[in-house]
Image (tube, rainbow, N blue to C red):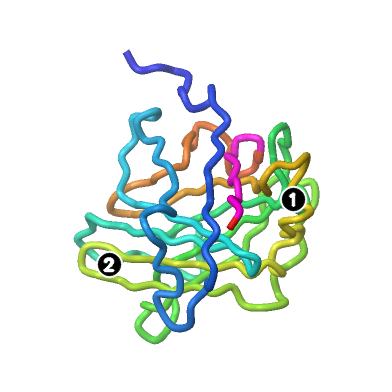
């Protein structure tokens, strides 16, 4: 008999993020992160299908993510004007831990990162910052510098990379984020959406309001160099 209570709600996930110097690289791929940077997979806790692999790394310049999607039979469906309904990676981040925080504040961000949707043939990647529903306050806009994004679309899937310079994220200061002698922590959640393969979640699915409730997000622990 399937459990009505997701096992993952019994845990507060803390995901280690490795320090990698020299990121982002010029050209593409700009990250090309090693296996050691792969984020843990909790699919067994939720009896969920996994079709993408997410990796992450950080340094004093910022933080980046790389997702690899396999198993597709057609190109990704991407619309730069409707990013939440498009294939791609949706990211929620907070430059402070979010345990017990039920409404987003100025440290909380929401991004949609698409492998296509721009350019003459629609094969250039897109990144959009969107407001978080029910937020108590919004973060400053990320307008000081462009968010770096790179993608490669293949017959059976795609690779997508995104890099956030530290000045783009309000409060991203590893020294200030380290509390009580601990490593710096960020709130974090992701949704990987695909019209063909479905939806892949970090933990709980749409039965829970992870879109608007940061207390449901996990924590990224930024490991030292």
State the residue position of label 2: 75
Q: Depth check: 85 or 143 in front?
A: 143
Report the side of 14 relative to 168 (left or right): left
Q: Image height check: is 197 above or below 33?
A: above
Q: Depth check: 87 or 26 in front?
A: 26
Nearest to N terminus: mark 2 or mark 1: 2
User: Which residue is found at the position 54% from the left and 35% from the top?
Assistant: 13
State the residue position of label 1: 177
Instruction: Classify residue 59 by image quadrant.
Output: bottom right
The single residue placed furthest to the front in the displayed view is: 225
Q: Position of residue 166 (x, y in %)?
A: 68, 66
Quarter of the figure that contains the C terminus: bottom right
Q: Image height check: is 102 above or below 64?
A: above
Q: Position of residue 26 (x, y in %)?
A: 48, 82
Q: Image height check: is 43 above or below 119?
A: above
Q: Image height check: is 130 above or below 136?
A: below
User: Which residue is found at the position 70% from the left and 63% from the top?
Assistant: 169
| Magenta-colored span | 215-224
Kindly report the distance in space between the C-alpha atoms of the residues bearing marks 2 and 1.
40 Å
Report the side of 1 relative to 78 (left or right): left
Q: Which mark is residue 97?
A: none
Circle 2 crowding by C-alpha within 10 Å: few under 14, some 14–19, many from 20: some
Instruction: Classify residue 55 by image quadrant.
Output: bottom left
Q: Position of residue 85 (x, y in %)?
A: 45, 57
């Amino acid at each position: 008999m399937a459990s009505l209570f997701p096992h993952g709600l019994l845990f507060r996930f803390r995901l280690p993020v490795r320090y990698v110097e020299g990121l982002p690289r010029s050209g593409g791929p700009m990250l090309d992160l090693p296996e050691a940077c792969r984020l843990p997979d909790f699919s067994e806790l939720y009896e969920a299908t996994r079709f993408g692999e997410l990796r992450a790394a950080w340094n004093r310049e910022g933080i980046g993510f790389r997702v690899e999607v396999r198993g597709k039979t057609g190109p990704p469906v991407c619309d730069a004007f409707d990013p939440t309904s498009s294939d791609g990676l949706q990211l929620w981040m907070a430059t402070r831990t979010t345990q017990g925080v039920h409404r987003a504040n100025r440290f909380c961000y929401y991004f949609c990162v698409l492998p296509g949707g721009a350019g003459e043939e629609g094969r250039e990647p897109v990144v959009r910052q969107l407001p978080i529903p029910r937020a108590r306050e919004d973060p400053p806009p990320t307008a000081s510098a462009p968010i770096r994004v790179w993608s490669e679309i293949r017959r059976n899937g795609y690779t997508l990379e995104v890099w956030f310079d530290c000045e783009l994220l309000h409060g991203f200061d590893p020294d200030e984020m380290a509390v009580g002698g601990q490593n710096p922590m960020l709130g974090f959640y992701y949704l990987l959406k695909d019209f063909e393969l479905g939806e892949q979640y970090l933990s709980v699915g749409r039965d829970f309001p992870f879109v608007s409730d940061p207390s449901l997000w996990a924590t990224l622990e930024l490991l030292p160099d």
